Image: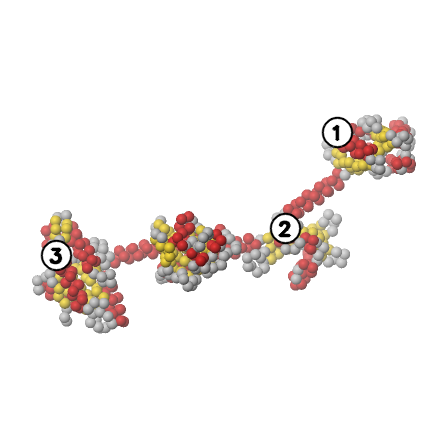
Amino acid sequence: MDDVLELDTVDGDKLLQRLRRTVDRTRAGEATIDALDVLGDAIYAIDADGEIQYVNRACERLLPHEREALVGDHVSVFLPPESIREAESVLRAIREAPDRNQGTFEFIASPIDGERRFYDTRITVLTDSEEQYCGSMGVIRDVTEKRDLESSRRLYERVFENLREGLILVERDEQGRPYYSDLNQAASHITGVERDEFIGSSPNDIFPTETAEHLEQLYRDLFENKTSREIYHKPKMPDGTIVTHSRLQVIEGLSGELQLLILIRDVTELARTQRDLEQDRKALRKLYDIAGRTELEISEKLQQLLQIGCDRLGLPYGFVTHIEGNTHRIVTAVGGHPDLQDGATTDLDKTPCRETVEQEDMVVYRDIASELSGEEHAHTQFGLNCYIGAQLRARGELEGTICFMSKESRERPFDEAHRTFVRLLAAWIGGELEREAYLEAIEQKARTDSLTQLPNREEVIRALEEELERARRHDHDVTFLLIDLDHFKRINDQYGHWIGDEVLRAIGILLQEETRTSDVAGRYGGEEFAVVVPHADLEGATRLAQRITDTLRAQRISTERGDVEITCSVGVTQYRGTEDDAKAIVKRADRALYRAKEEGRDRVVTSST
């Protein structure tokens, strides 16, 4: 049978007949050893009609079918229909090409035990003595495991390449030196080294000497001890650097050799988030500390709160503004911008804060010059190019804005942590403004006479003491008027106390109209009133007192019981030197007032002693 291996020189008809006789003799029980039966490969032969003429023992074991069941049957007994069509196509191509007599194709054998297996067959065309096609002979190999390995390899390659985490494989050469044998695209992106440059390289080829020596020793130790290790690599943290977390694990490769698998993750954003959270915690501690310091004035609190915001956002300028109509006024400023200090005003339309007011939400501009159309005042006039701002509200009403700015545009966006912090700071400052307004209202109420809305006795004395202190420092005049309504008890008795209250309110209005804004006119008690007159000598204060008495005498106070006439008596005195105090001045004015009453009321008397 050796001649059957030289198929190009064998008569196909004779070969098929010889193989057929071998099968017949085997069926008849005659002892025969066919040369093809001792081969490891599965061999089969079919005639021109597709009838199986021969199978060797390997083929019988491989398919698996009994030889007796296969021989004489059609090849479709183990070839599915689609494989038969492919076989016919291959045979046709071979027969039409005179320079070739072999071809290959793959098929799935019809399963017997339910197991799906893949086969590869190489076909050789057989011809007779007249070179006419008379059949074919083929070799079959079971390629199921090979296909599974290739499928696994392709799956591994897809998974390896598409992982978001970076994967690097390290192996050892014959001298035990570690080198990089593979890495995926994610690892190439994280390390910044191209794959072609990385594969086959040692740490010395990639990294600086100190880093390379450290890595090589680390790899050797891991290979030696067959252990794992985790590394958190945090370089300098200007924006753009990459922080990585790596896990190094020694594994056994498919070939049985040890490999070092490095899983590397880009944790830059996680590191930034952790850093932001820590900064938020520190900033919040500072906020609580400032809010709890009752000794601080509101202006000091606002400055310190703004500075915390500047530090947290990394921006140099911070502002608390008050908005009324189209007027934008800076209440408090930090950062030292030469043109934007406390009290500076501009049109709201010329500031980025107009968007904050209109949108009722936080507004962010990383680059004002490019994001706002036209000439933006903040950029063109003040050189500012980055803005983040939020509304300030107190008692439910818009008070203004809190905003932070810089001259440089910002490359990295403000993240949600930044925005949340600014919202928190805006709510905090709004609460401080609301608390300050509430305390001011309480204080104002404590200083004000509820009936006339003039300052009360305590506030008049306080104003007198303040003016006396200024007079001592700057040597200017201060005078004091004490006023008493003449026969006021008669009005209460004749008309009732509510009419008396109307008269007292009318006197309060008259005093506000007749005095200057720098004067302090207040209700001293009952039907008595007082006026502190700074920067006026005794003569000037007397003229004021006379004008008040004349106006009141000529006035008819309208009430629900009709018009009421009333007059007043006034005592006037002045500050007489550094030894003079508020108590002495009030006593002199009271004596002068007493004299005015004794002399007939409705007059002004000055204190001469």
Image-quadrant location for residue 481: bottom left
What residue is drawn where x is 21% and y is 64%?
532
Res 81 label: 1
Image-quadrant location for residue 489: bottom left
**Of the residues shown, which amino acid type is indicated by label 1?**
Pro
Q: Would you say residue 117 is visible in this rendering? A: yes
Vertical order, 504 against 538 (above or below): above
The residue tagged 3 is: 554
Picture coordinates of residue 23, whole percent (x, y) = 88, 29
Picture coordinates of residue 491, whole percent (x, y) = 11, 53
Q: Would you say residue 282 is visible in this rendering? A: no
Farthest-out residue, front: 374
Image position of 313 (left or right of 456): right
Cα distance between the residues tagged 2 and 1: 45 Å
Q: Nearer the viewer, mark 1 or mark 3?
A: 3
The residue tagged 2 is: 186
Res 146 label: none
Secondary structure category for the residue under label 2 = helix
What residue is drawn where x is 43% and y is 59%?
381
**Callout 1 environment at 10 Å: few (<14), some (14 to 19), or many (20+)?**
few
**Of the residues shown, which amino acid type is indicated by label 2?**
Ala
Picture coordinates of residue 70, whole percent (x, y) = 82, 28
Contact between marks 2 and 3 (CB within 8 A): the answer is no
Mark closer to the chain start, 2 or 1: 1
**Of the residues shown, which amino acid type is indicated by label 3?**
Ala
Cα distance between the residues tagged 1 and 3: 127 Å
Image position of 289 (left or right of 509): right
